Image (cartoon, grey):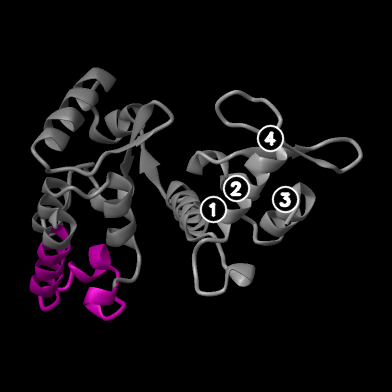
Amino acid sequence: MNGQQLAQWLEDLALADHLGAAGLPTFERDLGGVARWRDPGTGAPLTDDQLADLDRVLHQDGDDPAHAVPLALVQLRRQAHVRARLLASPTHTYATLARLRGVSENAARFAVHKAAGRGALLVVPHDGGALVPAFQLDDDGELRPELAPVVEPLLASTMDPWQVWAWLTQPAGLLGGLVPHEAVRDPEEAPIVRHAAVRLAERAAR
């Protein structure tokens, strides 16, 4: 593929926006609609040889290069969609959590850092700050007691906080499609959820 065909192919797959996150060359269309490819390191226009190398990289997955899909970009797109969905759900900043708990913002920040440090609260970094997903909290803004033994092994593992957030709030295969943070409210399901969390944490450590 030439540079124009490559750009159109990526746009058709809705993958063009994820090139930069993958460390790959990116393109912008000029006023005439022509794709202008740029080197991620120098910002210089890509040479024909560089475009050919990029084409090979993007088509290296699968048995048929002509129809291969760049899996790394697909994964980045999926991750971006998951993060967008998570960010659309209720969350707390230090300020909103302080109001919920009836304490100062500094006190809330200290308590959050202390709880996160001992693996007792899921805190997710975002835009240079921190978000506390609201699903894990009770009406007083404290970690739900039934969720503690589920959260702790996950946070003690090598899992990324975003992955922990996603697993806890989406249907889980290890639970037959149940949502972990909802299922753990049921005393009969709680031991199964805890076991699934431990297994997931162990898997992440391998």
Residue at the image point whose x is 24% and y is 18% from the top: 106
Which numbered dot is residue 138?
Answer: none
Please report contact status of discs 1 and 2: CB closer than 8 Å, yes or no. Answer: yes
119 to 6, vertically: above or below: above
Sequence-wise first label, 4 or 3: 3
Amino acid bearing label 2: Leu
Sequence-wise first label, 2 or 4: 4
Residue bearing mark 2: 54
Question: Dot 4: what SS?
Answer: loop
Q: Position of residue 155 (x, y in %)?
A: 16, 47
Residue bearing mark 3: 7
For residue 33, side relative to residue 52 (left or right):
right
Amino acid bearing label 1: Val
Task: Give me the C-alpha separation between circle 2 and circle 4.
Answer: 10 Å
Please report contact status of discs 2 and 4: CB closer than 8 Å, yes or no. Answer: yes
Residue sitting nearer the eye, 193 or 8: 8
Magenta span: 173-201
Residue bearing mark 1: 57
